[in-house]
């Protein structure tokens, strides 16, 4: 089939991160759409480049440096002119602000409540939650060109990790939390709730600036034998399949992509009613929701889930059905492909 759409997807992200992972996931998925021919523009991060190339995607790399890196900016603009795409989809601030208007339709994807000054020159905007879309429209972008397309998660088959391999042997319940160790993620609230959850162990997967403070809090609370810091992990799905419940205690969570991961892996979830989780979860139906920064309520909801495994399993089953209907890879890829075709027409 002759391609009907020429597409560039552009990301100037770091090695790890939610937007970076979704970029790679979507580029590889679009590679399977016959009538779309695409090129990936990104930083020269070997693991990402290998993954994209393995999916058959041509990759061009750039430094995407600061405002004085004029030579690299010039090479990037020259590449866009040479590729002559119908559509350019950019991710996050750096790639968006460095991508000029052109003969193509410029689409910017926002996965958080970013400063809109980096995106005003675009033709279309994609928000991965309705809340972000509403924020874009309130910021002055025309509503008819603001599109809501959620994320999908990595649906590769995984096998549950063995608890004993990560030092969680025994019959007690196992909780999992994951994310950047940052104040926005509120892992301190989860740690303060843990003494009210008898015998539960916690795996905390992630790295970040709050690690030292969180480790100190663990010692102060006498939880050293119940909390394990796993560092950055790329197998969160396998961890979810080993856990009895996933906890997302965030103060701020734009999408709550981790909620979708828990849904996909049928891991019962307890989350705070921050932006993304509150939009996704129906309390008591597809997960449990508690107020932000509410230690006692968080502990209570975790205990409810752990004390009624049958009900928790039913809740996880309904969550998986919700994922399959609205957030599955096939659903989201079809939506993106339709949008690319419409915009390019």
Image (tube, rainbow, N blue to C red):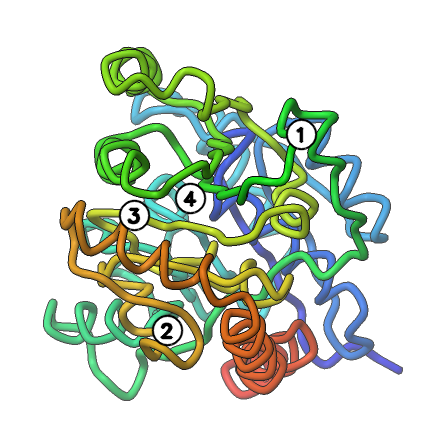
Q: Nearer the viewer, residue 143 or 314?
A: 314
Q: Marks 1 and 3, Cα distance to the nearest angstrom?
A: 25 Å
Q: Is residue 124 above or below residue 215?
A: below
Q: Earlier in the sequence, mark 4 or mark 2?
A: 4
Q: Nearer the viewer, mark 1 or mark 3?
A: 1
Q: Nearer the viewer, mark 3 or mark 4?
A: 3
Q: Is the residue under label 2 in contact with that under label 3 (CB below 8 Å)? A: no
Residue bearing the label numbered 2:
280
Residue bearing the label numbered 4:
95
Q: Marks 3 and 4, Cα distance to the nearest angstrom?
A: 30 Å
Q: Earlier in the sequence, mark 1 or mark 3?
A: 1
**Residue beneath the point at 37% across and 59% down:** 270
Q: Marks 4 and 1, Cα distance to the nearest angstrom?
A: 45 Å
Q: Earlier in the sequence, mark 3 or mark 4?
A: 4
Q: Marks 1 and 2, Cα distance to the nearest angstrom?
A: 33 Å
Q: Position of residue 202 (x, y in %)?
A: 47, 34
Q: Position of residue 289 (x, y in %)?
A: 28, 66
Q: Marks 3 and 2, Cα distance to the nearest angstrom?
A: 15 Å
Q: Marks 4 and 2, Cα distance to the nearest angstrom?
A: 28 Å
Q: Residues within 10 Å of mark 2 (few under 14, many from 20)?
A: many
Regarding residue 77, the answer to whether it shows in the image is: no
Q: Earlier in the sequence, mark 1 or mark 2?
A: 1
Residue 249 circle label:
3
């Amino acid at each position: 089939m002759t391609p009907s759409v020429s597409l560039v997807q552009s990301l100037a992200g770091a090695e790890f991160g939610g937007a970076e992972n979704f970029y790679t996931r979507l580029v590889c998925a679009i590679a399977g759409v016959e009538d779309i021919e695409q090129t990936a523009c990104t930083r020269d991060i070997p693991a990402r480049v290998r993954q994209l190339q393995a999916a058959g995607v041509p990759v061009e790399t750039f430094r995407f440096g600061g405002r004085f890196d004029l030579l690299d900016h010039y090479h990037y603009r020259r590449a866009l002119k040479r590729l002559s795409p119908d559509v350019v989809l950019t991710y996050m601030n750096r790639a968006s602000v460095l991508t000029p208007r052109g003969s193509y339709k410029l689409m910017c994807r926002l996965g958080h409540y970013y400063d809109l000054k980096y995106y005003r020159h675009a033709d279309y905007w994609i928000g991965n939650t309705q809340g972000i879309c509403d924020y874009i429209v309130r910021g002055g972008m025309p509503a008819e060109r603001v599109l809501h397309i959620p994320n999908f998660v990595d649906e590769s088959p995984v096998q549950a990790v063995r608890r004993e391999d990560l030092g969680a042997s025994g019959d007690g319940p196992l909780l999992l939390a994951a994310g950047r160790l940052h104040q926005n993620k509120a892992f301190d609230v989860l740690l303060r709730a843990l003494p009210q959850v008898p015998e539960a162990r916690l795996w905390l997967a992630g790295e970040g600036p709050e690690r030292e403070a969180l480790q100190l809090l663990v010692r102060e609370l006498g939880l050293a034998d119940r909390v394990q810091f796993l560092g950055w992990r790329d197998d969160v799905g396998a961890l979810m399949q080993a856990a009895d419940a996933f906890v997302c205690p965030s103060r701020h969570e734009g999408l709550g992509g981790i909620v979708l991961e828990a849904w996909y892996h049928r891991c019962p979830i307890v989350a705070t009613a921050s932006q993304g989780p509150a939009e996704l979860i129906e309390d008591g139906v597809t997960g449990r929701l508690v107020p932000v920064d509410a230690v006692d309520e968080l502990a209570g909801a975790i205990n409810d889930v752990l004390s009624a495994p049958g009900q928790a399993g039913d809740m996880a089953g309904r969550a998986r059905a919700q994922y399959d209907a609205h957030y599955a890879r096939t659903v989201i890829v079809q939506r993106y492909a339709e949008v690319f075709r419409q915009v390019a027409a």
